[in-house]
């Protein structure tokens, strides 16, 4: 049980979906913040990832291409 990072509703059944990370460096501390999402938001994230990975319907054709 926890809070969803997308809809920010608390006390829900959540699953780990990733993490925000900042690399360390001179004068900076490395930080990793786990992200949790509720079931509804997990579904939205899955659809967003699928849309991002899908190839375009029409492939890119350069302007100078003859057809």
Image (spheres, rainbow, N blue to C red):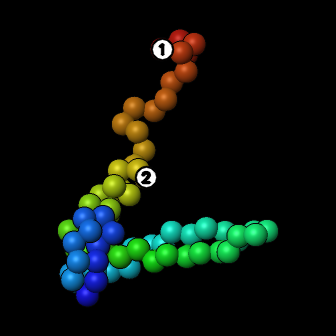
Residue 53, which numbered label? 2
User: What is the secondary structure assignment of the residue under circle 2?
Assistant: helix
Q: Position of residue 56 (x, y in %)?
A: 40, 39
User: Quadrant location of residue 42?
Assistant: bottom left
Q: Find out whether the residues at labels 2 and 1 contact each other: C-beta distance under 8 Å.
A: no
Relative to 27, 50 lies left or right: left
Residue on which the image places disc 1: 67
Relative to 7, 18 lies left or right: right
Residue in the picture at 57% in, 13% down = 64
* 53 lies above or below 42: above
Residue 33 visible in image = yes
* 47 lies above or below 42: above
User: What is the secondary structure assignment of the residue under circle 1?
Assistant: loop
User: In 3D space, how far apart are the residues under numbered discs 2 and 1 (Cα atoms)?
Assistant: 27 Å
Residue 4, which numbered label? none
Q: Position of residue 54 (x, y in %)?
A: 40, 49
Relative to 21, 43 lies left or right: left
Quadrant where the N terminus is found in the figure:
bottom left
Q: Position of residue 13 (x, y in %)?
A: 23, 83
Q: Residues within 10 Å of mark 1 (few under 14, many from 20)?
A: few
User: Quadrant location of residue 58?
Assistant: top left
Relative to 45, 10 lies left or right: left
Lower position in the chain sequence, tag 2 or tag 1: 2
Residue in the picture at 38% in, 79% down = 16
Residue in the picture at 48% in, 14% down = 67
Residue 42 visible in image = no
Which mark is in front, 2 or 1?
2
Closest to the observer: 62 or 49?
Answer: 49
């Amino acid at each position: 049980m926890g809070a969803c990072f997308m809809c920010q509703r608390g006390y829900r059944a959540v699953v780990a979906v990733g993490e925000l990370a900042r690399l360390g460096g001179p004068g900076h501390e490395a930080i990793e913040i786990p992200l949790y999402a509720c079931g509804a938001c997990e579904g939205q994230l899955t659809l967003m990832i699928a849309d991002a990975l899908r190839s375009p319907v029409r492939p890119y054709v350069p302007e100078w291409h003859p057809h």
